[in-house]
Each structure stands twice: as structure tokens, then as C-alpha cells.
Amino acid sequence: MDTARKDYARANPASAAAFAKAKASGIAGGTNRASIFYSPFPLTFVDAKAATAITADGQHISDFLGNYTAGLFGFSPQPVINAVTRAMAHGHALGGAPNTLEATVASALIERFEAMEMVRFSNTGTEANTYAMNTARAVTGRSKILMYTGAYHGAWIHGGDLALDIPYEKILVPYGDANHICQVIEENASDLAAFIMEPVMVNPWVYLKKIAPAPYLKQIRKACTEAGCALIFDEVMTSRLAPGGAQELVGVAPDLTTFGKYFGGGMPFGGFGGKRDWMERHDPTHAQTINSGGTFAQNALSLAAVDAVLSDLWSPEQCREHNSNADKFRDQINALMRSLNVPCQAYGSGSLMTLIWQRRPVICDTACIDENQVLDVSKHKAVSDAAQLFWFYMLKEHNILAGSPKLNYLTLPVALETVDYQNFLAGIKGFAVTYATELQQLSDVTR
Ligand SMILES: Cc1ncc(COP(=O)(O)O)c(C=O)c1O
């Protein structure tokens, strides 16, 4: 790791200088987004197109990170450029009055999500989740929010204790044991406003975006209905897995759905919606209106971009095809790793996957987690070191951004081409050969 870090620092002096300048400029910590910081310093991008980013040091790299899902369509997708350029020339953000793009985007979204009759927009996923939770609190007249231990729903919504969290009473449950979760819902029913979750398996230490089993989610759905609390699906990331989101894949309808990230085609966008009973209080003429909305919640630049995404870049067919190709890519990685006897699993659903460097199964596929099958990342530093080493290796030897640096979380952009996937497979094979001895040791400790 030391050698890899030193090589990285030597190869990227301009990124190092850019980061040092950002720190000296007064940006606290040198970046406005803690999740994109890594040691010794993050790469700085100076240009990009489609699936290729260009670093400050002039390296052209294929992007398998996809900006943590927000970059689904690659860099500078032409339909988004066209739509935003048009909007810029016709009143810019069109602030101060309603604009016609709002209805266009609302209808298109409602058509895709069966559980959604009404919708509202925001600028980020954090905002969307904050709105959804507070909508549930207003409608139910209750105060508490249930979520998974280790969940992430935005800058100030965590399944843990962080100083930034918005102050409401949180109840935390571990993912996995539906009976226990339903019991907690029942016991807290009198003051429980909502259960917010991503409809995926959850592990506090890593991105696991494999869809949770349908029977598990159905049992929780039933408990929420009986308790009268809202089931909120945070589909900020997972909605890309099917035209109607992960909820379509499992056949479970939440009361409120939230979304964001990729829908804006790179522009800031978020939203939330659900059935009329949950959403109608946002109507300013409602007797008990919540009176919601922000200055930029209907800005025409973002809405033009979302319109372009929904009409030109992400039809139901395009969505299905991309996820099915990604399933095949994941299978290819797993087959290759098995054939080379390497302790690595590509784990996830569709175009969201994480490489997990351990031998033992990641998590069981039933509703109940066996303690022995949780991830080793928290137990063995070597598992997370392997991910980082792989990331440095792919950057240096194959000009590939292999997902997130610390956890190899890959959110595949549609802009990637066959040759990029082939290069990735060649790269992971090269890594397995180069580090055969170390990977054998890793295999032994994670058996
Ligand atoms: C599942 C999930 N929900 C919400 C958010 C917050 O979205 P944003 O960063 O746009 O506020 C994120 C961001 O990573 C996320 O992963």
C-alpha cells in the first residue's frame, strides 16, 4: 500500500498541487464533499467526455465510478447539453413563477412509478429524504423515524450518530431479521411516523446494492401498514435498476419514494412522491397545508435536463438493456475470479455493484442474516486494503477508475463501451496475477 500510494503521488503532482491550492483557498478540508476525499489526495479532473475523464496530470481514464450513480449518462451527454442550452437562452432558471417544464417532468415520473400519484421536486437526495420524512411526520402527527443501523440517506440523515444529523428521534434496527424489525414497528406504532430504507441489503461498512428479498420487504410493508406509519423507499440510487425503480423489481409499493442523482443528467435534482393521501398536504390551498418548497425546487435548468434524460437517454428499454448488460459483466467478473481462485466477489444488482475482496459469502440471501456471514471489511483491514490496492493498480496500469477508491463501488455509466469492459476484465486478471501471493493470504484469512 505504501508503494502504491507513493507511486500515485509521483504520477499525479498536478492533482496534488490542485488539492493543496484548494486547502489553502480556505475550503475546509480542501473539498466540499467528504466522500470524494482519499489519501494522500484525490485526483482532480480538468475535463471529461462520455466515459473518459482527464486528470490535472493529463491522464485519460475510463470511469467505472459514475459519480456514485449521478453520472449514469457519462460526462456531458449531448441531449442534456442541448436541453440546458435551450433553457439558458429562454429565461435561464425561470425563477419567480411556475414554468411548463414542471408538469412535463412530473407526468413523466408519475408514469414510471406505479406507487406515485403526486410528486414534488427538490435539488438533492438529502432534501428529498428530509421532505419525505417530514411529510410522514406531518401526516401521521407522530415524531419518530426508523432506519437501518449504518444507513446513509443524505448529508444529515444517517443510521448512526453524527453531529450533523437533524434532531428528530431515531430508532435504529439492523438489516435482516424481519420478525425483529416488525416487532420494533409494532412496539413503537403510537409514535412512529416512518420507516425509511433503501430496498437493498444493507451493511454499515460497505455499499451493498443487492435488492433485498421480496418476502422480507413484503413482511415489513405489511407491518408498516398495520402500524399506520409510512414506508419510505429511498430510491436515490436504486431507481436506476428498473424503469419503475427497485420497487418494481420486488413488487412492493412504498408510501413515499425519493429520488435524485442521475435523473438530473448531471444537474442538481431530487424529488419525492407517493399516493394522494401522503402528498396532498403539499397543496398550498389544502386546509392543513405544509407550505413546502425552495427557491430552486422548480428551476428550469435542472428540469430541462431531467426532461432530456427521461425522453432521450433513459427510456424503459434503455434502462432494462443497461442493467441486463451489467448483470452479464458482474457474472463475467465472478466467473473470472472463480477460475483464478481469487477471493473476490462482484456483488450487487444490475448496474450497481461492489467488489468485495473476501472468500466467504458476503451475506445470506434469505431474510435473516447469519452473524458469520456479515462482511469481513470491518474485521479484516486486509479486505479494505485489497480494494484500495486494486484501485491504485487499475489507475496506474490500465487507466481505469475502478469505482470508489476505498470500496470499489462501481456504478456503471451507459457511456462505457465494450472495449472499456474488456480492459477492466484484463485489468482485474492482471491484478490477480501480480498479487497472487497476497491474495492467497487474503483468501486464507477470509475463508
Ligand atoms: C441512498 C442515498 N440517499 C440519499 C443520498 C443523498 O443525496 P444527495 O447527495 O444528492 O443529497 C445519497 C447520496 O449518496 C444516497 O446514496
Image: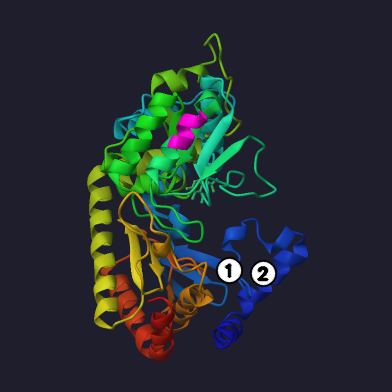
- Chief secondary structure of the magenta span? helix
Is disc 1 surrounded by few (<14), some (14 to 19) or many (20+) residues within 10 Å? some
Is disc 2 surrounded by few (<14), some (14 to 19) or many (20+) residues within 10 Å? many
Q: Residue furthest top?
A: 287
Residue 47, given in percent of the width and then of the height, sits at: 51, 65
Q: Quadrant of residue 348?
A: bottom left
Q: Quadrant of residue 434?
A: bottom left
171 shown above or below 66: above
Q: Quadrant of the C terminus?
A: bottom left
Q: Which residues are magenta?
A: 183-188
370 shown above or below 304: below
Residue 54, given in percent of the width and then of the height, sits at: 49, 70
Mark 1 vs 2, N-terminal side: 2
Camera sees residue 415: no
Is residue 57 one of those drawn in magenta?
no
Circles 1, 2 touching at the beta carbon (< 8 Å): yes
Q: Residue at x 44, y 80 (%)?
A: 445
Residue picked out by circle 1: 44
Residue picked out by circle 2: 19
